[in-house]
Amino acid sequence: MNVLLLGANGMLGPHVVKALEPHHTLRLTDVNDLETDHEYIKVDVSDLEHVVEVAEGMDAIVNLSVMRTDRVRAFDVSARGCYNMMVAAVEHGIRRVINTGPFYAVAGPTYERFDHGVGPDVPPQPGTWLYALTKSLGQEICEIFTQFHDIYVLDLLFYMFLDAETHVGEAGDPIAQVGHDLVPYTVSWRDAADSFRCALEVELEAMPSRSEVFFMFPDLPHGKFSNEKARRLLGWEPKDDLSKYWLKG
Ligand SMILES: NC(=O)c1ccc[n+]([C@@H]2O[C@H](COP(=O)([O-])OP(=O)(O)OC[C@H]3O[C@@H](n4cnc5c(N)ncnc54)[C@H](O)[C@@H]3O)[C@@H](O)[C@H]2O)c1
């Protein structure tokens, strides 16, 4: 499959590239410069014409772009970027779009006091945090396109990442030690990246609707956030058990 990646040069991008490169032909894009063996084009997702142009010839789009701060740029990247991506999908007849975001694009502060069973199909309550709000808006824009076009959007939502072997987290910080605290919703980079492989392989018509949201969490004993849907519909199986990092004693 020819796959376009938007925002491929961030923290998650290289892991996704590693998971997908054995199976697909990748066209990487980002607003920054990037040295890679894959095709690379510098693209600002807020530039509609350019996004449409680079999507030509693609079978799927994966959106990893995000801007967490700056009121205008966050809207331009996380919300308008989704609009541009969906216009590109319509223009080129691309039926498979994989969007991403933080879990609180759906399960924001309203859900903090729930003690278990929060799944990705709860009514979205992103709250007022710029990052969550703009990502949630982007997701909603994607969903509206699926109501009018034969395009499937699979939205993969995450909490936090960790390298299961080196204990290194985002931006290379050593964030975890065995027996110490770690947010238990953390998923390993490689399990997270593997969810993109699943989302590219899964049969679209097997989805309950053309817009489906997934929580990509490891197995949690308390079941606060459920990965059941991702396991069932995407066939995703998290392999790295990170419980030793957050179990005490
Ligand atoms: N890292 C985390 O802890 C975390 C947690 C939950 C969800 N996520 C989600 O995972 C996805 C990837 O996040 P990440 O951690 O790799 O983020 P990141 O900030 O490391 O990377 C985002 C990428 O988007 C690019 N970008 C910014 N503005 C752009 C623009 N105008 N045009 C094109 N690209 C642009 C950046 O250059 C960067 O390469 C996002 O959807 C994010 O919400 C990340």
Image (tube, rainbow, N blue to C red):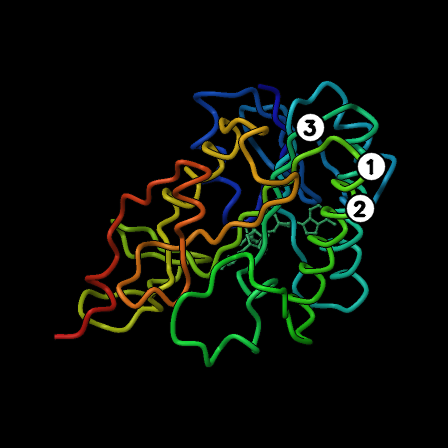
Q: Find disc 3 in the rendering and name its residue.
A: 95
**Could you tell me how many numbered marks the image carries?**
3
Residue 81 place in picture, x, y as percent: 76, 48
The residue positioned 45% from the left and 33% from the top of the image is 198
Mark 1 or 3: in front is 3
1 or 3: tag closer to the N-terminus:
1
Which residue is identified by label 2? 83
Residue type highlighted by circle 2: Tyr
Q: Which residue is mark 1?
A: 87
Going from N to C along the chain, the mark reached first, 3 or 2, is: 2
Q: Residues within 10 Å of mark 3 (few under 14, many from 20)?
A: many
* Amino acid at pointer 3: Arg
Q: Mark 2 near mark 1, Cβ–Cβ under 8 Å?
A: yes
Could you tell me residue 80's position as x and y percent? 80, 51
Residue 91 x, y percent position in the rendering: 83, 27
Q: Residues within 10 Å of mark 1 (few under 14, many from 20)?
A: many
C-alpha separation, residue under disc 3 versus residue under disc 2: 15 Å
Q: On the picture, is 221 further left or further right than 161? A: left
Residues packed near mark 2 inside 10 Å, few (<14), some (14 to 19) or many (20 plus): many
Q: Amino acid at mark 1?
A: Val
Q: Residue at x 53, y 42 (%)?
A: 13
| Residue 44: quadrant of the picture | top right
